[in-house]
Amino acid sequence: MHRKFVMSVFIFLFVLKGEAQQSWTMEQLIEKAVVNYPATKQKDYVRSLGKVNEKSIQQNEYPQVSITGQATYQSEVTKFDFPGIEGPKPDNYNIGLDLRYPLTEFDILKSKKELEQQKTELNIHQIDADLQRVREQVTTIYGNILLQKENRRILLVRISDLQSQKKKIESAVANGALLKTNQLVLESEILSTEQKIADIDGTIEGLVQQLSLLTGLTIASDSEFVLPAAEIVLSKTVRPELQVFQSQLTLLTMQDKLLKKENRAKLYVFGQGFYGRPGYNFLNNNFRVYGTAGIGINWNINNMATQKTKQKAIEINKQIVQQQQSAFELNLQSALVQKQTEITKYQTIISKDNEIVNKRKEILKVASSQLQNGAITSTEYITELNAENAAELNLLLHQVQRALAKVQYNTLAGY
């Protein structure tokens, strides 16, 4: 009964530990990092600012009304020497409204609103480009953690094997069958391996802290990091930087069209209403309401001279953006080809790694038997153990590197 109780407690604690251990996938952490990145929250502000600017432009569709007023005193006025006719007075007053309503601005205002929407879209794409760098950063850190953990796992197996051999050697040393130095060599190698594990633990801790900072999560260094099972995507690239270049070109084209519209003649109606004196009839000195209304045209000829210069500047900026896009696409294609070559290389290497590991395991099995029978020393055994560990480590590392290379290929392509 007591034994069953102890076993039940042991199983409960084991299950509890398994449930408590964190497990993370690369996709989870990338998603968390994107959500946690400050620029992500900035998107809402960019959209809100764009709406405010559009509303400000829309207000120009309404009549422009201004209040004017003045009071003046003239040092001299026109005098009349006619009976019953009073000449102008030197003090004049008026206050009124000036109204102007453009008739040809609606197309321009529409283009300005579309231009503002394009600016907002460009800013969003630029934020997405920043987030792409965050994705790449998380991918790199996650990959380094996987490599370090695989290395640590091999070293733990190594310690287990060394300790197993040490127990057998201790018995042989106690019986006088082997020299004490064989035991000391194994003990020294165990300490050296533990030292390497401690160094790896420190590296993992630092990498995990970086992930915690990027994602805003509390990630334990002993968490399980799942090896991604990704397959490369061979469709077209969807990098946000390409959308940035396209948005920049669209924005420049819209600016060119708006420039042409703004340099056209502008037609408007206007009206002015005042209260004061003397008004338009300067012979009437009574305070009264008076005004005028009409239609007008305005065409700034000087703009025609500067339009070609501005259009040339826009065209040069287009060429600059196109060259930047071409350079980016060339570098991207080069990186994708390099990464695809890397994936193929790992596939070839892994097939050889499997053969090497199998042969090294056979050699180590023989060396273990020879050590126990005193045919070889501990130093010679450790040499074979190192070779077998190195072969296993190479296999695991190359498997991880192949998986990461596939993820990195997809990330480079924008997926």
Image: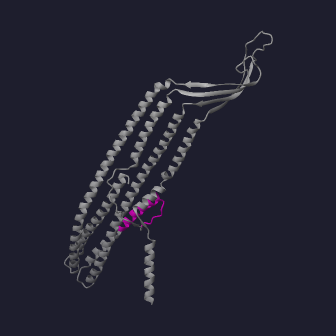
Q: Please report the bounds of the magenta region as a residue range.
A: 196-221
Q: What is the quadrant of residue 197 in the picture?
A: bottom left
Is residue 206 in sight in this rendering? no
**Residue ID at (76%, 24%):** 287
Nearest to the observer: residue 141 or residue 382: 141
> Residue 43's x, y, as percent?
50, 49
Q: What is the quadrant of residue 76 in the picture?
A: top right
90 vs 134: above or below? above
Nearest to the observer: residue 81 or residue 393: 81
- In this rendering, position of residue 329 left or right of residue 307: left
**Residue ID at (24%, 79%):** 179
> Residue 313's x, y, as percent?
42, 32
> Residue 302's x, y, as percent?
50, 24
The reply to whether the magenta stretch includes residue 22 is no
Nearest to the observer: residue 297 or residue 39: 297
Q: What is the quadrant of residue 186 in the picture?
A: bottom left
**Residue ID at (27%, 65%):** 395
